Amino acid sequence: MKECPHCGSVLTKVRSLPDHRRFFGLIRAAFHHWPESHEFQPDNEEHLRAWLLCKSGYRDVVSIPIDGEHPAVARLACLAAESAIKAAKGHAFVRPYASGLAVISPRSIAFDTLSQKDFSPIRQAVEDVITAETGMDCENLLMERAA
């Protein structure tokens, strides 16, 4: 690690603005080319960004146990949780499991808190998900969007 010679603070490489803009441009392009046959249909670019981050593994998961023996109880709880998230204008995904629910939300990629070193593998993982889910090359998506 490199330290500042004056104060001793650890210096990190700041986030690349062009890379940041490219990331969001790619999400915009993916949204406009998202397959109609895909099981996930995003409401908007931000919803797609949240889903891509979660799918790529950059997420937080909160497990909520449900005491009930009927699958309908878990499904009803999922619907209630999803409605609460939407009402709060948030993006999270709720999935039932054997004894409860998992609430999956994307972790923050805030420009001023995530270094380029930490952001790069996240961006690459999101690009890999886009390619796997759509069958489209990310560079081609960006070029089509620019045209």
Image (tube, grey):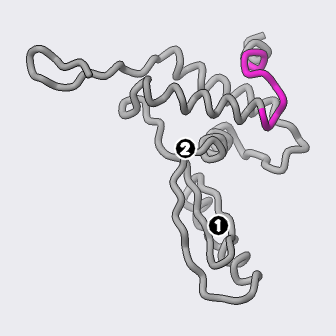
Position of 60 compared to 86: left or right? Answer: left
Predominant secondary structure in magenta?
A: helix
* Residue at position x 47%, y 42% in the image: 108
Quarter occupied by residue 26: top right
Q: Amino acid at mark 1?
A: Ser
Answer above or below: position of 15 versus 105. above
* Residue at position x 59%, y 25% in the image: 23
Residue at mark 1: 83
Quadrant including the N terminus: top left
Q: Nearer the viewer, residue 115 or 76?
A: 115
Position of 118 compared to 94: left or right? Answer: left
Is 62 included in the stretch rendered in magenta?
no
* Residue at position x 68%, y 71% in the image: 97
Is 137 included in the stretch rendered in magenta?
yes
Residue at mark 2: 58
Give the magenta part as a residue range.
132-141
Secondary structure at badge 2 equals loop
Calculate the distance from the C-alpha at mark 2 to the C-alpha at mark 1. Answer: 23 Å
Quarter occupied by residue 28: top right
Indicate the position of residue 136 as horizontal and vertical percent values.
Answer: 82, 25
Sort mark 1 into few (<14), some (14-19) or many (20+) by Cα contacts within 10 Å: few
Secondary structure at badge 1 equals helix
Q: Amino acid at mark 2?
A: Tyr
Indicate the position of residue 24 as horizontal and vertical percent values.
Answer: 60, 27
